[in-house]
Image (cartoon, rainbow, N blue to C red):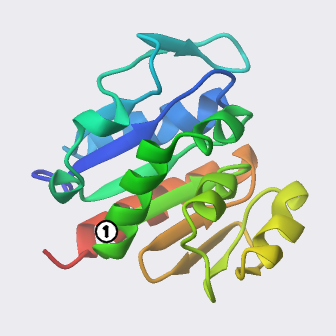
Amino acid sequence: MKLAGKRVAVLAEADFEDLALFYPLLRLREEGAQTVVIGLGASSYKGKHGVEVKVDALPGDVDPAGLDGIVVPGGWAPDRLRRDPALLSLVRTVFERNRMVASICHGPWVLISARILGGRRLTGVIAVKDDIAFAGGHSIDEEVVVDGNLVTSRTPRDIPAWGRSIVHALATQAP
């Protein structure tokens, strides 16, 4: 188990992209990581395709010092997630502690609102390309872009490569 002892948050809100939440969640658990699903108030949320995920905690309930990473799935959930100041503070703090932050699809919206993209290389769905540039990031059209502790991907078809990159980033992350 490559990720035994690691603790990773997976963000959830209504209309998340089902595969972009469940694939990394299950992959992380498979590798031995402890996961915590963070939402903004509901006890569970349904994805765009109707799959439901239970929430474990609110952003303010989670100590960023106890996290080794955060996963921001895509879909329409990032548009809701990026409006919550406590969630943005959690993402920013984890990022500033040089812990892994991963996003896919529309997930960069959360990174943009957390104000962590200055000068960083990343990818996302084509619709956020200009948003990334306006936030000071450099949008790269590749299936996965790893820039330090930032691991990003474009769309569900890229999820296998994104999942491998998340596991690798966490497994090789300095303590």
Residue 142 at what x, y percent from top left? 75, 73
Q: In this view, does 161 lie above or below 97?
A: above
- Identify the residue position indicated by label 1 in the image: 99
| Quarter in which the C terminus is drawn | bottom left
Residue 86 at what x, y percent from top left? 41, 44
Question: What is the crowding at mark 1: few (fewer than 14 residues within 10 Å), some, or many (at least 20)?
Answer: many
Residue lying farthest front?
A: 85
Asked whether, in this view, residue 60 is left or right of residue 18, the answer is left
Picture quadrant of residue 51: top right
Of 129 and 34, the residue lying toward us: 129
Of 12 and 154, the residue lying toward us: 12
Residue 141 seen in render: no
Residue occupying the point 47% across, 65% down: 165
Residue occupying the point 10% across, 52% down: 5
Residue 61 at what x, y percent from top left? 24, 34
Of 67 and 142, the residue lying toward us: 67
Asked whether, in this view, residue 132 is left or right of residue 150, the answer is right
Residue 94 at what x, y percent from top left? 33, 63
Q: Is residue 2 above or below residue 37?
A: below
Q: In this view, does 173 lie above or below 16?
A: below
Residue occupying the point 72% across, 16% down: 49
The amino acid sitting under disc 1 is: Arg
